[in-house]
Amino acid sequence: MGLRWEALIVNSVDPSRLGRWWAESLGWDASEDEEGDVFLTPPDSGMPEVQFLAVPDGKKAINRLHLDFRPDDQIIEVSRLLELGAVHADVGQDTASWVVLADPEGNEFCVLESRAPMG
């Protein structure tokens, strides 16, 4: 196959602030270029990276694409993300096993239930 996934792009009004928020949330490395765009790379230097690029307008509707995270402990991670500045988001999930949060610019993401240990 001739394609390789290089990056996930996040449009942002303030890429420096939002990119650094996600870097702290994920524990990833962040770098910023001269235009103020922020690039996150996983600690193992694997791909894809996440890029936060400047756009003039903020988010206006529900995300068409969002991230799901599966933590070791859902309650602890949701609390930690809320302390970092995430907020609860309602996207019509009713009662669900996942928690929908939004980052400081309103981008929704899900924190799934922890998986039971196998074995």
Image: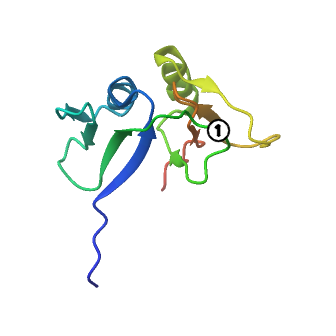
Rendered residue at 28%/85% (across/down) = 1
Is residue 5 left or right of 106 when viewed as pictured? left
Relative height, residue 86 to residue 118 (above, below): above
Q: Nearer the viewer, residue 14 or 4?
A: 14
Is residue 104 left or right of 44 when viewed as pictured? right
Is residue 81 left or right of 16 when viewed as pictured? right
Q: Amino acid at mark 1?
A: Lys
Q: Within the image, what quadrant is residue 87 found in?
A: top right
Rendered residue at 61%/32% (across/down) = 101
Residue placed furthest toward the bottom: 1
Rendered residue at 25%/56% (across/down) = 47
Residue 17's spot in the image, x, y percent? 37, 23
Helix, strand, or loop for circle 1? Answer: loop
Residue 7's spot in the image, x, y percent? 31, 55
Residue placed furthest toward the front: 56
Residue count near mark 1 (Cα–Cα under 10 Å), binned few <14, some 14–19, many ≥20? few
The residue carrying mark 1 is: 60
Q: Within the image, what quadrant is residue 107 found in?
A: top right
Rendered residue at 25%/44% (across/down) = 42
Q: Nearer the viewer, residue 17 or 46?
A: 17
Q: Nearer the viewer, residue 116 or 62?
A: 62
Relative height, residue 34 to residue 2 (above, below): above
